[in-house]
């Protein structure tokens, strides 16, 4: 392991002198051991050094040169954080200049005319070794917990040995889902044990051939390794091994991969990209390795823009609330019975953005709370308008993202919205997706029970996509069940979906709650659902989500044709 790093590569030496003969002599002495690059005056040397990827192990510097002399080069190099690390040996015949340059920070000197070649070579080698040891000592080499390299040292290492690497190498970032929970539930000691074991597994499973790894920021690992094709199975193997040994908690390990192209020489950037690819997997459970791509980068930039713009969007009413009607189909003819508020973003530069494009993003960073609060308030204002103008009570359901349940102000915020528009809590139905119940069930149940005791009604959204067992369902404090669209989509062709709908209807009857089917697009679906005894339907078959003014027109029409129900749900 890590054998590729014993350094037989040729290091680069920059020799600066205006006399070609001197450069030729130096080249003769050093060429076997080093790659020698020439510059003919101080200005040229600074130009070469200013390349951010310039990596010289030594600068051999003449002092007396036209355009820019050696003293000025020393001064400029010492003033630059990056260049300060490159050792300088001055080449001179003038004793006074020697002393002055050493004072300014040169590491050593070689007297002209040149000493014996072996002496010159030995001095260069000694200075290079000394400076490399120093740079290693400067950063703490190892992570005390796992024994892997520390992050700083990891990058020093990659940079130093980059030029000698042949073959394709990859940057891989490994991260756990919610590792803080492990520390909280199982204790820090167990958390540390898992991190240590992860480091061992990275060594034995991923770094079998060439490569190095480090740990950064707690539970994140960087791996730089020879390209392989089986990262998915490596990551799974690490995850499964960890889970076998810590059965009380199930860990999920994700990885992001970036494959540096030739000429792509900034290692920190590779790992930033790999991290982006890794973060994108947070909510995608079917893969454990994410690949960085151009599209991912563009998506990342797009998301950054949405995050930067959201406050202004709310302030300037770029967020629009659409209302999708729900119809009660229990009677002879379908009647309009309520609506779901669905947000859209009419972005000034990017145009119309649908919630599928921004809701998951804002859910992942917590900003969804702002959007949700805005939508609740808009919806309450709309309910009020409908009451005042059309004299009907039409409840509206709003989506409540999971994160709100950890907000101690949730109940107060909802109650103040209700109060401000003089409504009853039962008029604002709160839709919570089934998967929100998946973790911290007890806590969420408690918040829901509180909200229900204040009079709010709770609808379980996207039912059938989450993890709740039927058994759990019978104990859940809910008022309405919303079947996920995928069952409706498949019901005409797939017996299993039909059976599941029947089963849910049975449970709903037992719980005495109505069932809503969403995503009903065609008449045959509608007819079959009606026959099965479904209560409420939402979908394009009746209407797409409508802007507020169109929704109001629909209400007018429904009043005229007597197809409006004033709020069973
Ligand atoms: P959801 O709550 O399950 O909403 C139903 C989605 O199905 C809506 O998509 C709606 O436009 C779409 N839909 C309705 N009928 C049909 C149909 O017949 N066929 C098809 N193919 N689709 C239909 P939309 O508006 O794009 O919203 C997507 C999701 O975004 C919503 O799913 C909800 O989870 C989330 N969302 C929307 N607005 C908000 C909000 O204000 N807050 C939060 N937290 N989430 C929101
Ligand atoms: Mg919904
Ligand atoms: Mg839904």
Image: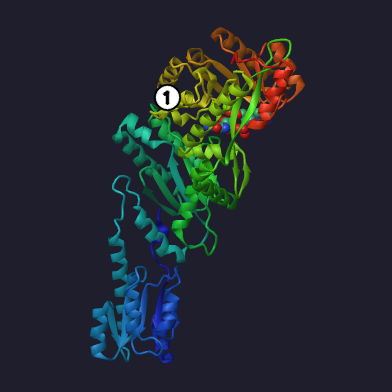
Horizontal arrangement in the rendering, residue 237 relative to residue 491 (left or right): left
Q: Residue at x 50, y 39 (%)?
A: 362
The answer to whether residue 115 is seen in the rendering is no
Q: Residues within 10 Å of mark 1 (few under 14, many from 20)?
A: some
Residue 505 lies, in percent from the top left, at 62, 12
Q: Is residue 119 found left or right of 546 in the rendered image?
A: left
Residue name at image x 41 percent, y 67 percent = 8
Image location of residue 279, percent across then percent down:
48, 43
Q: In the rendered view, does 156 fall on the left or right side of 423?
A: left
Q: Please determine whether, in this image, residue 427 is positioned above or below residue 21.
A: above
Residue 534 in percent (x, y) is at: 66, 14
The answer to which quarter of the image holds residue 485 is: top right
Rendered position, 369 above or below 316: above
Asked whether the viewer can see residue 194, the reply is: yes
Q: Nearer the viewer, residue 396 or 82?
A: 396
In the displayed image of the protein, which residue is found farthest to the right? 524
Q: Quadrant of residue 537?
A: top right
Mark 1 secondary-structure assignment = helix
- Which part of the image, by quadrant, shows the C terminus? top right
**Residue where numbered disc 1 is placed:** 411
Q: Residue at x 70, y 10 (%)?
A: 331
Toward the viewer: 48 or 378?
A: 378
Nearest the eye: 96 or 465: 465
Q: Is residue 413 above or below residue 83?
A: above
- Image quadrant of ligand 2? top right
Q: Residue at x 42, y 45 (%)?
A: 202
């Amino acid at each position: 392991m890590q054998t590729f790093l014993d350094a037989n590569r040729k290091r680069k030496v920059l020799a600066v002198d205006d006399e070609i003969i001197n450069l030729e002599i130096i080249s003769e002495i050093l060429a076997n051991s080093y790659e020698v690059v020439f510059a003919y005056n101080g200005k040229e040397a600074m130009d070469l050094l200013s390349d951010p990827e310039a990596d010289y192990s030594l600068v051999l510097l003449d002092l007396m040169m036209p355009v820019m002399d050696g003293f000025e080069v020393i001064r400029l190099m010492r003033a630059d954080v990056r260049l300060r690390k490159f050792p300088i040996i001055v080449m001179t015949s003038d004793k006074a200049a020697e002393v002055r340059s050493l004072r300014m920070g040169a590491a050593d000197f070689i007297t002209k005319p040149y000493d014996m070649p072996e002496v010159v070579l030995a001095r260069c080698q000694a200075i290079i070794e000394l400076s490399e040891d120093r740079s290693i000592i400067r950063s703490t080499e190892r992570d005390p917990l796992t024994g892997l390299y520390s992050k700083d040292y990891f990058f020093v290492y990659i940079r130093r040995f980059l030029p000698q690497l042949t073959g394709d190498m990859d940057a891989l970032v490994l991260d756990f889902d919610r590792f803080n929970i492990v520390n909280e539930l199982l204790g820090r000691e167990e958390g540390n044990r898992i991190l240590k074991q992860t480091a061992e597994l990275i060594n034995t499973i991923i770094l079998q051939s060439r490569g190095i790894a480090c740990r950064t920021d707690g539970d994140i690992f960087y791996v730089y390794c020879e390209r392989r094709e089986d990262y998915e199975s490596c990551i799974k193997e690490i995850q499964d091994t960890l889970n076998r040994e810590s059965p009380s908690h199930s860990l999920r390990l994700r990885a992001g991969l970036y494959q540096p192209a030739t000429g792509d020489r900034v290692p920190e950037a590779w790992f930033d990209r790999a991290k982006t690819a890794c973060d994108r997997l947070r909510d995608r459970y079917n893969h454990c390795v994410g690949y960085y791509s151009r599209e991912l980068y563009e998506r990342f930039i797009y998301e950054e823009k949405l995050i930067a713009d959201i406050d202004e969007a709310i302030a300037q009413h770029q967020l629009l609330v659409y209302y999708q009607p729900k119809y009660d189909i229990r009677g002879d003819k379908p009647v309009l019975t309520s609506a779901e508020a669905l947000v859209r973003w009419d972005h000034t530069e990017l145009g119309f953005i649908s919630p599928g494009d921004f809701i998951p993003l804002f859910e992942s960073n917590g900003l969804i709370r702002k959007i949700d609060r805005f939508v609740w308030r808009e919806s309450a204002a709309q309910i009020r308008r409908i009451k005042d103008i059309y004299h009907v009570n039409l409840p509206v359901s709003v989506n409540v993202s999971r994160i709100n349940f950890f907000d101690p102000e949730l109940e107060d915020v909802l109650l103040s919205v209700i109060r401000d528009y003089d409504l009853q809590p039962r008029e604002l139905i709160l839709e919570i997706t089934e998967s929100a119940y998946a973790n911290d069930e007890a806590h969420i149940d408690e918040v829901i029970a509180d909200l229900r005791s204040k009079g709010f009604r709770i609808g379980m959204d996207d039912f059938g996509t989450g993890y709740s067992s039927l058994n759990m369902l019978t104990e859940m404090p809910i008022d309405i069940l919303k079947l996920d669209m995928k069952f409706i989509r498949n019901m005409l062709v797939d017996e299993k979906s039909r059976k599941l709908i029947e089963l849910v209807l049975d449970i709903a009857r037992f719980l005495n709650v109505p069932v809503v089917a969403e995503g009903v697009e065609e008449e045959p679906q509608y007819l079959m659902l009606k026959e099965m005894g479904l209560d409420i339907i939402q979908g394009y078959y009746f209407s797409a989500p409508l802007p507020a003014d169109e929704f109001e027109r629909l209400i007018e029409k429904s009043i005229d044709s007597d197809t409006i129900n004033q709020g069973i749900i």
